[in-house]
Amino acid sequence: MNKTAKILFLTHVGNLGGAEIKTISCARYFKNRCEFCTFDDGDIRPMLKQNDIAHEILEMPSGFKNFKRENNPLTALKTLPQALGFIWRLGKKCKNYDIVIPVSQKSFVFCALSKIIARKPIIWFMNDLLSPEHFNPKLIKFLLLLSRFSANHIIVNSEASLKAWLESGGTHNNVSVMYSGIDVNSFTAQIPDENALKTLKKNYAGENGKLIGLFGRISTWKGQDVFLKALARLPENVHGIIVGGAQFGEENYESELRKLAEELGVAQRVTFTGHINNVSALMAACDVVTHCSTSPEPFGRVIVEAMLAKTPIIASRAGGPEELISHEQDGYLYPIGNDKDLAEMIETCLSKHLGPDDILVQSAYDKAVEKFSDIQTDKTLLQIIENLSGTI
Ligand code: UDP
Ligand code: GLC
């Protein structure tokens, strides 16, 4: 058995989404025998450097940058000639490794096509719900077909993602569920003391205000609009922070959200912080953290992080959050997209004055540590890699 298999992680983006943050955490575990190859440059570069993880950028042909998951894969055919050189270069790169792990859909497609050259086993990190809410149905079929020929193992990030995988025609063969674990110690170490948290909260909510947070990249399905609408239904002393950036080119949507805040009359009560590198202090400073995705969330790291920050969490009842939260035991679930119900739940939650010592908050923390820490994730991945290494 090859216990020191060299690993190449791949993503097509240059900025940080949850999948990339999780993969950096895994790469730290395999530090001396892995590299992260991205098809674009961005915030991920300093993060990898800081973590001492080898990194190379292999620029993806421009024609593929604009391809969206809602598109029919046939529309990408005309750009295929451009892609051949890239597939060749990627194949040569993969050849230097024992196992290749693509963590985004585009990197999986290119990695699968380059297997003809590389001939190395592929573990596909499927961080998405393969459902028509998220993908063009033809693209789902294409991804499934490609995986049959190329992926030696598929790792989905929740039972919900597994269900979507099976419903779209995937099989149980060589598929594992691996949650997107959080590094509990690093996350909680950055939470300051109570006084500092009070000051932080005051910066956003004033002397006696309440602070509600929404954390996550700015994207049309992450529900920042639902958050603003719920805020508009709440009393004047309730303030909001929207923490996250337009990581993957959705700057226009951010402008629309700012306009919506004006129209709803909440612009003075909401702060858009942009992307910040560590969210734990701000999460802990909030009275309530909300999750507002309007399409089922595949997993939802921000939910686990709120649990670790000991702030009550209210999330959309669909996909991963249903697995992460037991309603009224360690968090709250509301009907997806419903700003009225969300606002009511926020009010109820605020009226309970839930602090870090309350049983619901403590249960959430314990569950996050026990089930969703990176220790579990690393163990699962190591096992899969070892099993695979034994067969190559
Ligand atoms: N995040 C961050 N800075 C921000 C907003 C979010 O570092 O300003 C992190 C957040 O802490 C979480 C990740 O981005 O770890 C988002 O992961 P999630 O699974 O919630 O959503 P995804 O972006 O993967 O769809
Ligand atoms: C994806 C999903 C998110 C998940 C993350 C890590 O980006 O959108 O729900 O938590 O990957 O697996």
Image: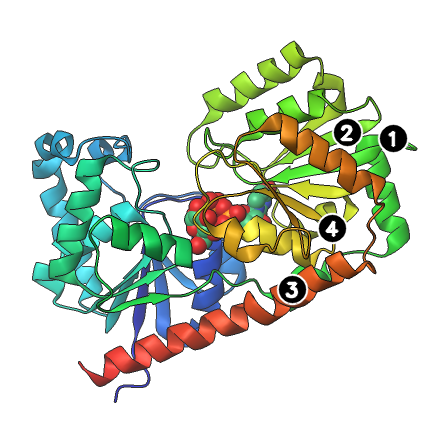
Residue at 41 percent across and 65 percent down: it is 178
In the rendered image, the vertical position of residue 273 relative to residue 367, given as above or below: above
Q: Is mark 1 within 8 Å of ligand 1?
A: no
Q: Nearer the viewer, mark 4 or mark 3?
A: 4
Looking at the image, is mark 1 or mark 4 earlier in the sequence? 1
Q: Nearer the viewer, mark 2 or mark 1?
A: 2
Secondary-structure class at tag 3: helix
Badge 2 is on which residue? 239
Q: Which mark is residue 186?
A: 3
Q: CA distance from mark 1 to mark 4?
A: 19 Å
Looking at the image, is mark 2 or mark 1 earlier in the sequence? 1
Tags 2 and 1 touching, CB below 8 Å: yes
Mark 3, other Cα within 10 Å: few <14 / some 14–19 / many ≥20: few
Q: Amino acid at mark 4?
A: Thr
Looking at the image, is mark 1 or mark 3 earlier in the sequence? 3
Q: CA distance from mark 3 to mark 2?
A: 28 Å
Mark 2, other Cα within 10 Å: few <14 / some 14–19 / many ≥20: many
Tags 3 and 2 touching, CB below 8 Å: no
Residue 102: % across, % down? 29, 57
Q: Is residue 167 left or right of residue 376?
A: left
**Scheme of image coloration:** rainbow
Residue 246: % across, % down? 50, 32
Residue at 17 percent across and 69 percent down: it is 120
In the rendered image, the vertical position of residue 337 relative to residue 334, given as above or below: above
Residue 122: % across, % down? 22, 65
Badge 1 is on which residue? 206
Looking at the image, is mark 4 or mark 2 earlier in the sequence? 2
Q: Amino acid at mark 2?
A: His
